[in-house]
Image (cartoon, grey):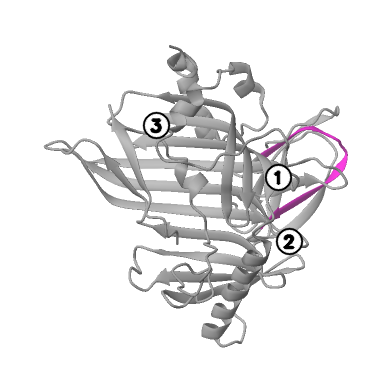
Amino acid sequence: MPTIRSCLWVGLLPFISWSASGQDLSGKVLDAQTGQPVSYASVSLMGTTQGTSSNAEGEFKLPRAKLPGRLLVSELSHRTDTLTVTGTQLVLVRLQPNTVALPEVQLGSYTTEVLKKAYRQLQRTQEQKSYSQAFYRQITTLDQDPTEVQEMIWQAKSGNAGVEGTAMAQGRYAKKKALLNFKDFSLYTRSIAMAAFTADSSAGVMPLSLNPGANNTLRLVGVTENGERQLVEIGFRNKAQPENEYGSVLIDAATYQVLRYRTTTQALNVKVNNPAFKLTGQTSTLEWVFRPVVAGAPILDHVKVEYRGILHRPIKADVPVQASSFLFLYDSQREAPSSVTYLPAKKGITDLEAIKATSYNAAFWQNNSAVKRTPLEEKIIASFEQQGAFGTMLTP
């Protein structure tokens, strides 16, 4: 659970492409038992550097894929699978869910020790950084009506606890006339870490610490087999606010790498600058997902943030508010580019100001394979594009 009591003010009124020739390969990843889409599964062609990730609807696309080939598909909650692909027909991949088991151990001591070892692993590898291309999207809805869309391409610096700095490459923003807009929602993605490395990590405010049970009730959710890896998932709840601060951590039992961290909190409070309006029922869910490595620090794969609240107005009906963001990192490397300056997230510098400092390139957004969307997102963004909202609103 983040310890940053962040406050965000709002104002009123596939990813990878290659130069080699080939065929475009599209597909969808499904849960073999439920038939539901498997979001953010890793998809790659074995023996090549070609890879991508499924979107929130389980869809993926490999531009200019070298076929025939062997497709490798993996996701933390499912068993890794491979299949042969020979042409450009739609590929359906059905992954079997991992089998969950509860080992015969003393659960209290087991969960505590796993979290402590995972934290020590974070401490040992905290100096190892990754440098990636990154795609960020944010969509705001008021009473289920999309009112705001923001997309940015960054160069990003990340560590084993989250994003540490970004450099803007491209950005665009569009909004409808609405009761409120979010000016710097990406601060949540860029400034909050899932663990704090301090001189004294025994206070145990976060579950990833040297004393994870001090302020948290721990629960062993289960142990699963993912290929040759055994994954341990531990749930936690804040003892002082059990209904407001809770989540889970997924850890590799052999390496103690943290592979997924989820938390729901009321710590990220949004405020409006109209005293007649009030936001209540605010909750935020954050999720960090990492790609495991053989040795060293895992590489950040994606970050999701979702905010929900209720806007109260005098006399008029309440309005449900939702802001969701997704950050996907790709083309990761350990060596820092010499020509890039990575800036930490700072309050007072809004996303819109950063976007206005760049020139809008419509072709970039239409043809960039990094800009991956679900069908719903396609519909939302197409409606903004048809209105000429992108680009035009950023010109003086």
Specify whether residue 176 is in view: yes
Figure quadrant of residue 23: top right
Q: Nearer the viewer, mark 1 or mark 3?
A: 3
Q: Is residue 62 magenta?
A: yes
User: Residue at coordinates 45% horizontally, 27% vertically from top-left?
Assistant: 353
Q: List the residue tagged with mark 1.
A: 92
**Which image quadrant is residue 4 in?**
bottom left
| 215 sits to left or right of 281 | right
Q: Residue at x 50, y 34 (%)?
A: 376
Secondary structure under the numbered disc 1 in the rendered image? strand
Which residue does the image show at 85% across and 39% down from the upper left?
86
Q: Which residues are magenta?
A: 60-75
Confirm whether the magenta stretch covers residue 178: no
Residue 102 is situated, as x and y percent measured from the top left of the image, at 59, 79
Q: For mark 3, what is the residue?
A: 146
Q: Which mark is residue 102?
A: none
Where does residue 254 sit, x and y in percent of width and height?
A: 72, 72
Q: Kindly identify the amino acid type of the residue bearing the numbered disc 1.
A: Leu
Q: Is residue 33 above or below residue 19?
A: below
- Residue that label 2 marks: 296
Mark 1 or mark 2: name the one nearer the start of the chain. 1
